[in-house]
Image: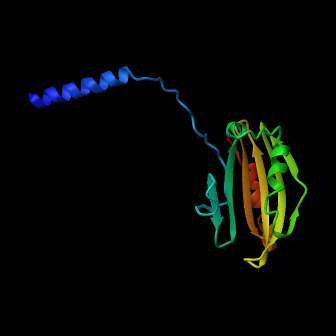
Amino acid sequence: MKRLFAILTTTLVLMTMSVFAQSTLKEYKVGHVIYVSLPDYMSKTVGLNSAAMLQYKSTVKDVYGYIIEDNKEELKLAELNYESINEFYEDFIKDFVKDEDKRKVSKPQYRKKGEINFVECDVTFYDKEAKSEIYFFVGIVETNYSYYKILSWSTAENKEKYKADFQKILYSFKD
Protein backbone atom coordinates (compact mmCIF):
# COMPACT_ATOMS: atom_id res chain seq x y z
CA MET A 1 0.00 0.00 0.00
CA LYS A 2 2.84 2.39 0.88
CA ARG A 3 4.47 1.58 -2.45
CA LEU A 4 1.27 2.33 -4.39
CA PHE A 5 0.87 5.61 -2.51
CA ALA A 6 4.51 6.57 -3.33
CA ILE A 7 4.03 5.81 -7.03
CA LEU A 8 0.80 7.82 -7.20
CA THR A 9 2.39 10.76 -5.38
CA THR A 10 5.44 10.76 -7.68
CA THR A 11 3.22 10.60 -10.77
CA LEU A 12 1.06 13.46 -9.52
CA VAL A 13 4.12 15.62 -8.77
CA LEU A 14 5.60 14.99 -12.22
CA MET A 15 2.32 15.75 -13.97
CA THR A 16 1.91 18.96 -11.99
CA MET A 17 5.44 20.07 -12.88
CA SER A 18 4.79 19.65 -16.62
CA VAL A 19 1.51 21.57 -16.42
CA PHE A 20 3.23 24.55 -14.80
CA ALA A 21 6.29 24.64 -17.08
CA GLN A 22 7.86 28.08 -17.43
CA SER A 23 7.89 28.25 -21.21
CA THR A 24 6.21 26.74 -24.20
CA LEU A 25 8.09 24.68 -26.73
CA LYS A 26 8.35 25.35 -30.44
CA GLU A 27 8.94 22.43 -32.77
CA TYR A 28 11.73 22.69 -35.36
CA LYS A 29 12.30 20.52 -38.37
CA VAL A 30 15.99 19.85 -38.87
CA GLY A 31 17.14 18.86 -42.33
CA HIS A 32 15.12 17.22 -45.03
CA VAL A 33 15.32 14.16 -47.21
CA ILE A 34 17.22 14.20 -50.49
CA TYR A 35 17.40 11.55 -53.21
CA VAL A 36 20.46 10.78 -55.27
CA SER A 37 21.40 7.73 -57.35
CA LEU A 38 24.84 6.15 -57.40
CA PRO A 39 26.26 3.70 -59.96
CA ASP A 40 25.99 0.10 -58.73
CA TYR A 41 29.78 -0.19 -58.43
CA MET A 42 29.84 2.55 -55.77
CA SER A 43 28.81 2.21 -52.16
CA LYS A 44 28.23 4.52 -49.25
CA THR A 45 31.27 5.09 -47.05
CA VAL A 46 32.72 7.35 -44.35
CA GLY A 47 36.02 9.10 -43.79
CA LEU A 48 36.27 11.20 -46.96
CA ASN A 49 34.88 14.46 -45.58
CA SER A 50 33.49 14.98 -42.07
CA ALA A 51 31.09 17.73 -43.26
CA ALA A 52 29.48 15.50 -45.90
CA MET A 53 25.91 14.29 -45.65
CA LEU A 54 26.68 11.40 -48.02
CA GLN A 55 30.03 9.88 -49.00
CA TYR A 56 30.55 7.24 -51.69
CA LYS A 57 33.38 5.30 -53.31
CA SER A 58 34.67 2.35 -55.25
CA THR A 59 38.18 1.48 -54.17
CA VAL A 60 38.40 -1.11 -56.96
CA LYS A 61 37.76 1.55 -59.62
CA ASP A 62 39.55 4.27 -57.60
CA VAL A 63 36.61 6.73 -57.68
CA TYR A 64 35.25 8.72 -54.75
CA GLY A 65 32.78 11.43 -53.91
CA TYR A 66 30.67 13.20 -51.36
CA ILE A 67 27.79 15.66 -50.97
CA ILE A 68 27.83 18.68 -48.67
CA GLU A 69 24.69 20.66 -47.89
CA ASP A 70 24.73 24.42 -47.31
CA ASN A 71 21.28 25.25 -45.95
CA LYS A 72 20.07 28.67 -47.18
CA GLU A 73 18.56 29.60 -43.82
CA GLU A 74 21.83 28.81 -42.02
CA LEU A 75 23.82 30.71 -44.65
CA LYS A 76 21.64 33.78 -44.01
CA LEU A 77 22.21 33.45 -40.26
CA ALA A 78 25.94 33.53 -41.04
CA GLU A 79 25.30 36.60 -43.23
CA LEU A 80 26.17 34.75 -46.42
CA ASN A 81 23.41 35.85 -48.76
CA TYR A 82 23.77 34.39 -52.24
CA GLU A 83 21.52 35.82 -54.94
CA SER A 84 21.94 32.90 -57.34
CA ILE A 85 23.59 29.55 -57.97
CA ASN A 86 26.16 31.43 -60.07
CA GLU A 87 27.18 33.56 -57.09
CA PHE A 88 27.39 30.49 -54.81
CA TYR A 89 29.44 28.60 -57.42
CA GLU A 90 31.85 31.51 -57.97
CA ASP A 91 32.42 31.88 -54.22
CA PHE A 92 33.11 28.15 -53.86
CA ILE A 93 35.28 27.56 -56.93
CA LYS A 94 37.66 30.47 -56.31
CA ASP A 95 39.10 28.66 -53.28
CA PHE A 96 38.61 25.04 -54.31
CA VAL A 97 42.07 23.38 -54.43
CA LYS A 98 43.46 26.82 -55.25
CA ASP A 99 46.92 26.05 -53.87
CA GLU A 100 47.43 22.86 -55.85
CA ASP A 101 49.95 22.66 -58.70
CA LYS A 102 48.71 22.88 -62.29
CA ARG A 103 45.12 23.69 -61.26
CA LYS A 104 42.74 24.02 -64.23
CA VAL A 105 39.04 24.86 -64.00
CA SER A 106 36.75 24.46 -67.00
CA LYS A 107 34.00 26.88 -67.92
CA PRO A 108 30.87 26.17 -65.86
CA GLN A 109 27.82 24.63 -67.54
CA TYR A 110 24.39 25.64 -66.18
CA ARG A 111 21.16 23.66 -66.42
CA LYS A 112 17.70 23.81 -64.88
CA LYS A 113 15.56 20.73 -64.29
CA GLY A 114 12.11 21.60 -62.94
CA GLU A 115 12.66 23.86 -59.94
CA ILE A 116 16.26 22.70 -59.38
CA ASN A 117 19.28 24.62 -60.71
CA PHE A 118 22.53 22.85 -61.55
CA VAL A 119 26.05 23.93 -62.45
CA GLU A 120 28.95 21.65 -63.30
CA CYS A 121 32.63 22.04 -64.13
CA ASP A 122 35.82 20.01 -64.34
CA VAL A 123 38.83 20.70 -62.12
CA THR A 124 42.21 19.05 -62.53
CA PHE A 125 45.40 19.51 -60.56
CA TYR A 126 48.65 17.71 -59.80
CA ASP A 127 48.68 15.99 -56.42
CA LYS A 128 52.25 15.84 -55.09
CA GLU A 129 51.37 13.22 -52.50
CA ALA A 130 49.72 10.86 -55.00
CA LYS A 131 52.23 11.87 -57.68
CA SER A 132 49.50 12.01 -60.29
CA GLU A 133 46.97 14.33 -61.83
CA ILE A 134 43.56 14.29 -60.11
CA TYR A 135 40.24 15.00 -61.80
CA PHE A 136 37.30 16.47 -59.85
CA PHE A 137 33.81 16.72 -61.27
CA VAL A 138 32.28 19.64 -59.38
CA GLY A 139 28.50 19.85 -59.29
CA ILE A 140 26.47 22.48 -57.48
CA VAL A 141 22.73 22.08 -56.94
CA GLU A 142 20.33 24.81 -55.83
CA THR A 143 16.94 23.88 -54.38
CA ASN A 144 14.43 26.03 -52.51
CA TYR A 145 16.08 24.99 -49.23
CA SER A 146 19.79 24.59 -49.83
CA TYR A 147 22.85 24.58 -52.03
CA TYR A 148 24.60 21.23 -52.39
CA LYS A 149 28.17 20.59 -53.49
CA ILE A 150 28.47 17.22 -55.19
CA LEU A 151 32.15 16.44 -55.63
CA SER A 152 33.29 13.27 -57.40
CA TRP A 153 36.86 12.42 -58.35
CA SER A 154 39.28 9.96 -59.87
CA THR A 155 42.67 10.14 -61.50
CA ALA A 156 42.77 12.44 -64.52
CA GLU A 157 43.57 9.49 -66.80
CA ASN A 158 40.13 8.05 -65.90
CA LYS A 159 38.23 11.29 -66.48
CA GLU A 160 36.53 10.19 -69.71
CA LYS A 161 35.75 6.79 -68.24
CA TYR A 162 33.80 8.12 -65.22
CA LYS A 163 32.63 11.64 -66.08
CA ALA A 164 29.29 10.42 -67.49
CA ASP A 165 28.62 8.52 -64.25
CA PHE A 166 29.54 11.60 -62.20
CA GLN A 167 27.07 13.62 -64.27
CA LYS A 168 24.36 10.99 -63.72
CA ILE A 169 24.91 11.31 -59.96
CA LEU A 170 24.56 15.10 -60.16
CA TYR A 171 21.44 15.15 -62.34
CA SER A 172 19.72 12.37 -60.33
CA PHE A 173 19.55 14.75 -57.36
CA LYS A 174 16.04 15.46 -55.99
CA ASP A 175 14.71 16.81 -52.74
Task: Residue 26: tell me if it is visible.
Answer: yes
Q: In which quarter of the image is residue 146?
A: top right
What residue is shown at x 91% (from left), y 56% (from top)?
Answer: 107
What residue is shown at x 82% (from left), y 55% (from top)?
Answer: 93
Residue 112 is situated, as x and y percent measured from the top left of the image, at 83, 42
- Compared with 11, 38 (above or below) is below
Residue 94 is situated, as x and y percent measured from the top left of the image, at 84, 55
Residue 106 is situated, as x and y percent measured from the top left of the image, at 89, 59
Left-right relation of 104 to 129: right
Q: Which of 27 and 118 is in front in this view?
A: 27
What residue is shown at x 68% (from left), y 51% (from top)?
Answer: 68
Task: Residue 41: tell me if it is visible.
Answer: no
Tell me how many marks there are: 0
Left-right relation of 22 to 175: left
Q: In which quarter of the image is residue 4?
A: top left
Q: Nearer the viewer, residue 81 or 109?
A: 81
Outermost residue toward the front in this view:
22
Residue 46 is situated, as x and y percent measured from the top left of the image, at 58, 61
Task: Work out which quarter of the rendered image holds the C terminus and state it.
Answer: top right
Task: Work out which quarter of the rendered image holds the N terminus and state it.
Answer: top left
Outermost residue toward the bottom in this view:
131
Outermost residue toward the right in this view:
107
Q: Nearer the viewer, residue 6 or 64?
A: 6
Image color mode? rainbow
